[in-house]
Amino acid sequence: MQKPSSRRNLLALGITLGLSACGGASSDEPLVIPAAPADQGAAEVVPLPTVTAFVDTIATNQRGDARYATLSTNAGVRVLGGFLDVWKPLTEIVDAGVSAPAVDGFPAVVPSTWSGVPNDGTPDGKVVNAAVHQANIDYVVKATASRSAVQAVQAYLDDRRGKGYSVTDGMGPLTDAWRSAAQQVTSITTVASDATSKLYNDTGNNTGVAGSANERFGSVVDLVNLVGNNASTEPAKRFYKYARPYRWSSSVQVLPTLVPAKSSTPTTDGGFTSGHSAEAVRDAVAMAYAVPERFQEMLSRGLELGESRILAGMHSPLDVLSGRILGQASAAANLADPANMARKAAAVTQAHATLMAATGTNADTFATFAQSGTLADDRFADYATNKANYLRRLTYGFTPVSATNAIAAVPKGAEVLLETRQPYLSDAQRRVVLKTTALPSGYPVMDDAEGWGRINLFAAADGYGAFSGNVVIVMDASKGGFNAADRWRNDISGNGKLVKQGTGTLKLAGANTWSGGTELTAGTLQGDSASAFGTGDMYVRGGTLVANAQTALKLAGNYTQLSGSTTLELDLGAASGSQGSLAVASTATIAGGTLHVKFANGYKPKAGDVLTLITAASLKGKFATITVDGFANVTPNYSAATLTLTIGS
């Protein structure tokens, strides 16, 4: 083995090593550079559904207007039309306690004779799917029989307080700053103890002080209020005429402190759909839009409030999940309205400026602070728990009633819901994200023709679920926030190819299986899981590839690193050297560039240790530069299949 003609100390800042270093291909053997992964064609484009769009017709979500009294003429009723496969109301008109004169050729609306009390001998409608209906009511019976004391308190507060105030605790470390800036107040700070006579009504201001009356945060409050435009659940309630769960079954145990809140007029008090749930979801969506650093936590809080309605005995799962559907659609319609573009931008800018000032953070530290809570002071601090709860609350365990493999549709305008969370993606790309992370088909109520029921915003925040064609991601770090760095935690499948461009950092943490390969041309691409880069080839044309997995980062195909401004960073974190190393199943071709070795999780090798950095079926070529943090004397050792590093004294 021929040693380098000139041995230099390897300092933290790095040192250039010639290609004549120990082992590997001899200098007179030309290095053959493989081709980049094959072009997989144009990226997927998700077409708009061919049905009438909710975002174009939200203004029809009205009651007391004969023009908007039917399934086909009322957007809020239409988006929940799948409920007709479970329950057929006495009349398919927005007419429960409602009358309206004839207008423009639409017949007058006459109040329905629906009594609102099932099984009282009055014709009130027909159960179409007995199994789903029974499961819906049984769920509430079981939930109210087993609710904990903590759940009871939360259910009471979520019932009586303003929904906008309640959901702001999803902001975690930012909650106090948000409430102070919004000037939000509530009069309900305790739980009623007298179940028969005491009922607290919130005399606070719910979302806070809006507009010019609140110089620091008025635009943010405006945004939260904005998403409620034309978003009422009353038209759906008065169309579907489906009773509250405690009216279906006496075994439902309404929370004692909420018994005084039970309506004495059941004819105008339908359960489907839940107003609390819809409002909580759209408020949470607006807050997540303004502060995407708490995106998944806010969405989790919105769905939690919906579940509180079940635990209170006031609503059924179908009432609640339909509230999620209508709430998200309403928020999207208002956010997607071109007339609101300036208001959205002003709210996002003001939210960050004000919250940074209040928390002593800046653009570089704000995101970290927003995620700095612990379970002791932020019940949404655990990602895995949030994810599990969110998924459970999307379907409440209903058995699918039809095929589960129908291709997901993506509603017109739904992409706006990810606009601030994934600002580096185009609208077309966000639509693909929504499609590839959608729920399976077949669940009751959720298979609306537009696709609102199957949207899983929590999963969508974690990036694509599948690649098709060339998926080109361009991130501009100079714009800050998620433009500068983001992490995708989904398991990505498909036969597409990932092309990472731009100066920002994209981290992949899923158990990924896409097969079309990966090409890095600029910025940073980080593997946070063993199979972060799927089953294809990895081609580093420019930028930095980081191996940060808890085991070796495994590449199922070839690894190629070109010369010039290319870097492979290995974040070693275990004495064995496997954590953060690179394992290439086929050929690793190193045409130059830099290798940067770092040490993570407190790990630091000692003199004499031999670290295995790269293993491959075949290793060809050498790095032009190797840098090792914290050591002044190391020796690289190349073989036909391995690169190791010996730590000197």
Image (cartoon, rainbow, N blue to C red):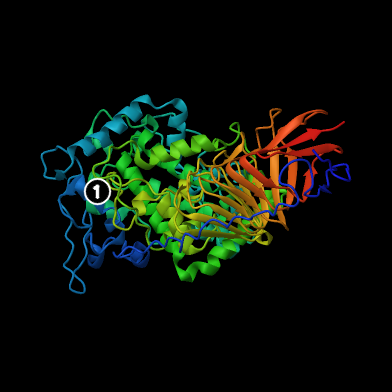
Q: Which residue was labeled with disc 1? A: 83
Q: Nearer the viewer, residue 457 or 137?
A: 457
Q: Position of residue 86 (x, y in %)?
A: 21, 44
Q: Nearer the viewer, residue 99 or 631?
A: 631
| Quadrant of the snapshot with the C terminus | top right
**How many numbered marks, from 0 up?**
1
Which residue lies most toward the bottom here? 104
Q: Position of residue 1 (x, y in %)?
A: 79, 38
Q: Is residue 279 left or right of residue 618?
A: left
Q: Nearer the viewer, residue 249 or 596?
A: 596
Q: Nearer the viewer, residue 553 or 334?
A: 553
Q: Secondary structure at mark 1?
A: helix
User: Which residue is depicted at the point 66% across and 56% down?
Assistant: 523
Which residue lies most toward the front here? 28
Dot 1 surroundings within 10 Å: few (below 14), some, or many (20 or more)? many
Classify residue 449 by image quadrant.
bottom left
Residue 338 lies, with reference to residue 432, above or below; the image says below
Q: Is residue 28 left or right of residue 5?
A: left
Q: Position of residue 263 (x, y in %)?
A: 29, 42
User: Which residue is depicted at the point 46% across and 32% down?
Assistant: 153
Residue 472 lies, with reference to residue 293, above or below; the image says below
Residue type for callout 1:
Phe
Look at the image and tell me whether residue 419 can be seen: no
Q: Is residue 124 left or right of residue 434?
A: left
